[in-house]
Amino acid sequence: MPHLNLALLGPFQLTLEDPIDVRVESDKTRGLLAFLAVEHDRPHSRAALAELLWPAYSEQAAAANFRRVLANLRAVIDDRGARIPHLRITRTTVQFDPASDAVVDVLRLRDLLKTPATTPMWAAHMKQDIALYRGPFLEGFTLRGCLEFEQWVVDVRSELDRLVAEAFHDLADHCWDQGDVTRALALYRRSLLLNPYHETVHRKIMLAYAAAGQRQDVRSHYEAYKRQLQDELGAQPEAQTTSLYKTLHAGQAVQIEAPGLLETHTQLALPQADPDSSERKDFVGREEELALMHECVRKAASNHGAILLVVGEAGNGKTALLHEFARRLAGAAQPWLVAIAASTALFGVGDPYQPVVDALRMLVAGEAGVPRPFSSAETLRLLQEEAPDWAALALAGPASGAVCGPLHGQRRHRCKRPRMQKAEG
């Protein structure tokens, strides 16, 4: 058994090989250990850690509180009694040592999920890996008033949920390949618990029901997902999802060699919309809004840029209005470069600039079927000249692992908060 076992997936759990009679004085001690263990790849300044945990305190009071909590943490984990100390401590920095005799479930899961699917016994190992996932990162844990710490928890939780959802998805595909559709269906459902809007998984679930002869379940699943999208996002399923549902509900067979090839085997023929027919009927009575949007375009063409906010209740056609505006703009005489991205508080939490990053990636990498008056290379060149940091984000890709957290890069400028001189445990 390791000297220290730290479980952060699900509720916080700390186990020692030889328990000692030292009480954890506050949740700040637990929060500090969790942060240091997960962000172990570099040393953290004491000042930055103190500000992270006591953001509204003066530097002197925050530093005093930090020294007290750090001393309590060292006693709680018996750092002096460990064969290799868990913490590397200097006068100015603190860092968790992953080479010490400690097991941290988050670190172990991250490493295991990097295993290529071509590795022998991959499926068996993957089942063991996802068994580590007891629940969301630091479930139920909070530090009131520590906004940057809370944001860090959200960021890590979002990253881990995405990785585990992908693992469930990959393992489900493997089970399907092996002919175990029932097991695959259960794993697809678990993936959706972590990523509820992954339409490829929804399509695979419908296909699994169809393969089992459960046509009524195909309909139930599709209708439930359609209601969920409408109620929570004011959106509709993708055209491909709807087309697949209609095919399956009609009892037509869809041949798939392997679930991983789903996207290439369910490209069902969809009718091309006539821009002058049914699509235009959705916009009866919205010409006033479109005229206002085109007025913003006119000003932008005169070097007077603008931001236009479209607000309204879910389901009243905001997305449809924006897509119609983009469609008309694409047909304008003057060439316009249109970038589209989306975000919601219910998905991708912790990435407040993600729509901007996604739009930049679309401009740099291009998008199939989207007419573009400027080349990707030209767009990238302008980005690199005018905004090199944004260009790096655009080139990084969705799985780059880039992190923007409270202690990454330079310290942020922040509004002055009330200074409290009282020390806290």
Image (cartoon, rainbow, N blue to C red):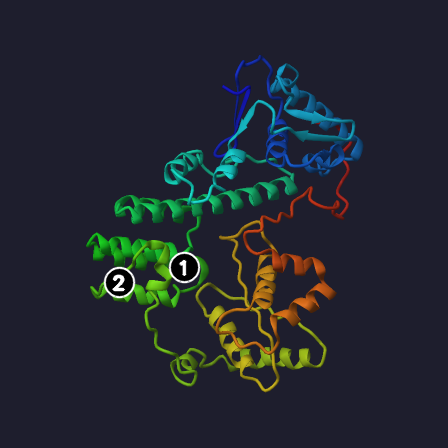
Amino acid type, callout 1 = Leu
**Crowd rating for badge 2 (residues with CA inside 10 Å; few <14, some 14–19, many 20+):** some
Give the x, y percent position of residue 351.
58, 52
Give the x, y percent position of residue 371.
53, 77
Mark 1 secondary-structure assignment: helix
Tell which of 336 and 321 is nearer to you. Answer: 336
Measure the C-alpha gap from mark 2 to mark 1.
25 Å
Residue topped by disc 2: 254
| Residue 229 circle label | 1
Which residue corresponds to the image point at 62% horizontal and 25% vertical from the top-left? 26
* Residue 272 seen in this snapshot: yes
Above or below residue 352? Residue 123 is above
Which residue corresponds to the image point at 26% horizontal and 47% vertical from the top-left? 179
Q: Is residue 297 left or right of residue 191?
A: right
Tell which of 294 and 3 is nearer to you. Answer: 3
Which residue corresponds to the image point at 21% horizontal and 57% vertical from the top-left? 215
* Residue 425 seen in this snapshot: no
Q: Are marks 2 and 1 in contact (CB under 8 Å)?
A: no
Q: Is residue 232 left or right of residue 384?
A: left
To which quarter of the image does residue 353 belong?
A: bottom right
**Crowd rating for badge 1 (residues with CA inside 10 Å; few <14, some 14–19, many 20+):** some
Mark 2 secondary-structure assignment: loop
Disc nearer the start of the sequence (2/1): 1
